[in-house]
């Protein structure tokens, strides 16, 4: 009886609003850029010399000139926004971030191209599985100055 009263009170207070816009959900995996690695995927902390830790994955959007974004812990491998995106044709893209919400250097990863999806109020757009290709091997380190920049590292 108390449960029914709580639900009824919640409906009276909050109504049955599905939000002001649409939502987006996605999953992600990190793939090493080098084919020399035996691993098909790497974790957010690849544990390889010179490679840094990917802290978050950020979804960016632009709908009708209004930009927004939302980030999730990289280890979650899945994220969903609230019903925050305005209705209309949305441009959506994903980027990795290092500690402190610092975007990863553009030359250390490859992300899928921007996609366009129609956002409808109360509905969820699914981006499915997104694969980010990250540089995690042959990294520049004090011992290997000829290496290349790797994901989430400072200047060699």
Image (cartoon, grey):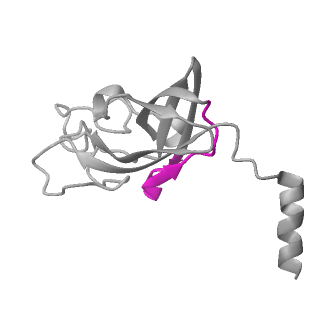
Classify residue 47 as left or right of residue 147. right
Return the x and y of residue 106 as percentages of the image width and height. Answer: 34, 27
Of residue 26 and residue 14, the one placed in the foreground of this image is 14
Magenta stretch, residue numbers:
72-86
Q: Residue at x 31, y 48 (%)?
A: 30
Above/below status of 142 relative to 107: below
Q: Quadrant of the N terminus?
A: bottom right
Residue occupying image coordinates x 33% and y 39%: 151
Please say whether residue 83 is one of the residues in the magenta stretch. yes
Give 2 or 109, whichever is nearer the viewer.
Answer: 2
Q: Is residue 108 above or below residue 24?
A: above
Q: Quadrant of residue 141?
A: top left
Number of marks in the image?
Answer: 0
Image quarter for residue 111? top left
Q: Please name the residue shown 42% across and 36% down the image.
A: 94
x, y percentage for residue 114?
37, 28
- Image location of residue 52, percent across then percent down: 36, 45
Residue projecting furthest to the bottom? 1
């Amino acid at each position: 009886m108390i449960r029914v009263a709580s639900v009824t009170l919640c409906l009276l207070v909050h109504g049955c609003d599905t939000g002001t816009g649409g939502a987006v959900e996605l999953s992600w995996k990190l793939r090493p850029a080098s084919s020399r690695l035996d691993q098909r995927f790497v974790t957010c902390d690849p544990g390889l010399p010179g490679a840094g830790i990917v802290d978050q994955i950020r979804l960016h959007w632009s709908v009708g000139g209004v930009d927004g974004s939302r980030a999730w812990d990289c280890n979650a491998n899945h994220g969903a926004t609230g019903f925050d995106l305005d209705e209309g044709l949305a441009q959506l893209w994903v980027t990795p971030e290092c500690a402190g919400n610092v975007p990863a250097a553009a030359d250390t990863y490859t992300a899928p191209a921007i996609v366009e999806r129609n956002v409808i109020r109360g509905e969820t757009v699914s981006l499915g599985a997104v694969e980010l290709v990250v540089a995690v091997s042959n990294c520049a380190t004090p011992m290997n100055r000829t290496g290349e920049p790797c994901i989430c590292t400072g200047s060699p």
